[in-house]
Amino acid sequence: MIRMIVVRVFVALLMVLTVTVAFSQQPGLTMRRDGTGVVSIGYHGQELLATAPASLSITVAETDGKSTTLQGNADARRTLDGDTIIHTFDGAVLLTNITQDGDTVKLKVTLRNTGQKPFTRMRYKPFIFQFPKRSLGTSWKWGYAVTTSNEGEPGVVEANWGDSKVLACVDEIERPVTFGFDGNYGNSTTNALTIEMPLMLQPGKETQYRFSLRFAPGNADTLALTRDLNEQFARRYPYTLTWEDRRPIGAIFLCLSATKWATNPRGWFGDSKVDITTEAGRAAFRARLMQYADQCIKEMSGVGAQGMILWDVEGDEMPHAITYIGDPRVLPQCAPEMDACADAFFKKFIDAGLKVGVCIRPSRVIPNGQGGWKHLQVDDHVAEMAEKIAYCKRRWGCTIFYMDTNVKWERGMWQGNASVLPAADLARLCALHPDVLIFPEFGRMGYWSVCMPYGELRAGTTRTKDSIKAIYPKAGSTITVADGDFFGNWNSLRQGALHGDIQLFRGWFSDPENRQVANVYRETSYLKRGATVKLHDTLAQQLTDADPVVRYTALSTITHPTHEQVAVVLERLLLEQDWVVKKQIVELLGASGQADAVPALASLLQDRKAGLDAFAGNALARIGPAATKSLLAMADSKDVWLTEKALDALSQYVDATALPAVLALSAHENLKIRLAAIRALGAQHDPSATARLVALLKDDQVNLLIEVCRALGRSRDRTAIPALVETIERSVRTLKNNTLRLAAGDALEAITGKEFGPYDNRWRSALTAGTL
């Protein structure tokens, strides 16, 4: 039997090696022409160019303010000097010079206006690509246009179909242009390479752009392949941010929006009993505000914050999307009760050694004629924001600013499409106020050269992207961590804090997550200090050192714990008082895989006050079946929280002995427990688990259905296919939920290997045809 297994493994490895060698022996990029232009582009033997013709449209401005479009196609082109394709129209000439440099196709596109009217836009599709498979990423599933703009960005789009990829790159950054792929509509693999130029090209003038298509293996380092573009971008937008303090910041929200409370129209403290209409009421408001400041200062100091930012100093009288006024200059008119107290309020924080900040917006705020306020788009956003910042600096000493809705609109506020303010605008603003920290709601790559754009953990931001760090190594983001999976993203959040991100936390009360913000920053300090620690003596002696950094570092150096080391660590666990060190012990015990660690970890999983339950659950899951008995005992608890934690641990590994209990809990009356049981069923790969999950697809609760789809995707059981097809149809026709639609499509793709994404009609057709 052992010999047979060895032979099978050898054969499998040989097959993988054969495929790899065959792929590597194929020529890299090949490009073939005929008398009309490029007719073939291949990479490692895979033909990528579809036969559909290129197309061109040019928008021409008319004297009456309207526009017309010149249309062109492949019939209007011819080859000149072997490298250049020329499109000639009545009033326009487009020259596309196409050359090959190794595994790169270079394009130089020149547009000439030979007519009598200015051009305002050019849209050009020089190639139609047929990728072997759909490219990776959610955007490709939906068939959206996957493009980049070089306005404040390096201009790189990646199409990766697994074994190979192509990077569509804008090779210059001086003038705005959009480049990329037009979208694989209907989830096909056909994608048009698209160039779109917003311009004002006068008669008799020409403009030129350079692009490249860089082909590489699918696992090649994108940052290395585009290093030249990143370096060029860094020269265009040099890093000038001088904000060295990267400690966390406490966020404050004072109000509820649009309450329409007669005595508290701005929603102060979320309390309908507040009365700002009488002198006595305003005095009580002031006293409560000062007490509130003291409460915030205590919480922020405990977390180790560098400062605070108040989102709604003007109150929240208006509904969304103008809830946050973002213009403290109008405070005397829009919230006189706060205007009378604001100076003393901010001074409390300054006196406590904390920086202070407020929210601003690029728009101008004016009365709406109905007792409220409205926003106007201004011509010079930079000047408008610079004045707001200057006012807050003079009056309160503000140095921290959140920039809400940092966009401009096509035809004025809320009219037409919105676009994020150019990176050059942020650079100009920060040059006027180099001593402040600004974190805009939306970010372009160039923003990171001068500020720290905003992100949210609940929306998936855990740290500054590697692509940004490749250009600006010192760059950081400002990330609000409330309502996100903090423990599940601990390592990424810690990595971000270690390398310069700032975490925003709820600063007005003792949110349990605030303690974890403090802990993650403390762990980063241990990592930094640990680099200089020299370890001596035995592990037992190291773990009794008075310095927690020594204890933490000693544990961090162990990758494969022995039985002797586990025994030492378990003994220390009972004595350890430092949370960060204790967490490291828990992670080491999980890495050991040893059953001896189960009782101690089970105890920590049940201890809410210790704050290590998430790490203990993961550690038990790493140990696996030896922990099942303890986890099942906890899953049988009447404590919903503990049952959910135990089931989440069971969802991370396979053990058939857990199946009966998990099946029973999938019918529990509590939704949280049912969801956790569904996740655990997805790990079991058992027919009875699949049958139960399929039965649950009859439910109408969208959150439950999404979890079931994910679990079935993990199971890869083909018997679930018909029910999943019905589910994706329900997501479109009755439930009308795109998240469920994607989840069902993902599950079907995982089971069948087909790439029909969220398109219910394609799944139904394939099921009917018997091809699934």
Image (cartoon, rainbow, N blue to C red):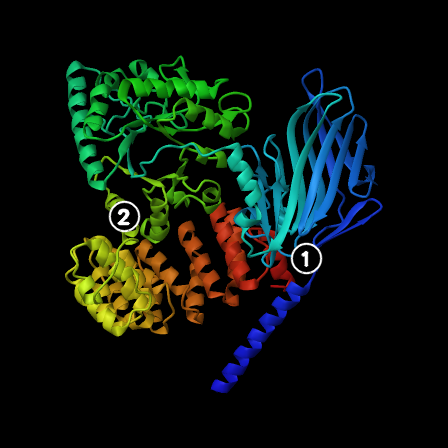
SS state under label 1: loop
Q: Which residue is mark 2?
A: 525
Horizontal placement of 371 versus 583: left or right?
right
Which one is in front, 236 or 178?
Answer: 236
Which quadrant holds residue 637?
bottom left
The residue shown at (50%, 17%) is 379
- Rounded to the nearest angstrom, the CA distance separating label 1 from label 2 is 47 Å
SS state under label 2: helix
Viewport quadrant of the C terminus:
bottom right
Location of residue 54 in the rendering, given as x and y in whole percent from the top left corner: 75, 41
Earlier residue among tags 1 and 2: 1
The residue shown at (18%, 36%) is 298
Location of residue 49 in the rendering, given as x and y in whole percent from the top left corner: 72, 51
Q: Compared to 624, does 37 lie above or below?
A: above
Horizontal placement of 635 versus 170: left or right?
left
| Residue 289 can be seen, yes or no | yes
Q: Compared to 264, does 510 lie above or below?
A: below
Residue 577's label in the rendered image is: none
Which one is in front, 275 or 248?
Answer: 248
Amino acid under label 1? Gly
Which one is in front, 386 or 290?
Answer: 386
Location of residue 130 in the rendering, given as x and y in whole percent from the top left corner: 68, 52
| Residue 275 can be seen, yes or no | no
Amino acid under label 2? Ser
Label 2 crowd (10 A; few <14 / some 14-19 / many >=20):
some
Label 1 crowd (10 A; few <14 / some 14-19 / many >=20):
some
Q: Which residue is mark 1?
A: 28
Horizontal placement of 66 versus 235: left or right?
right
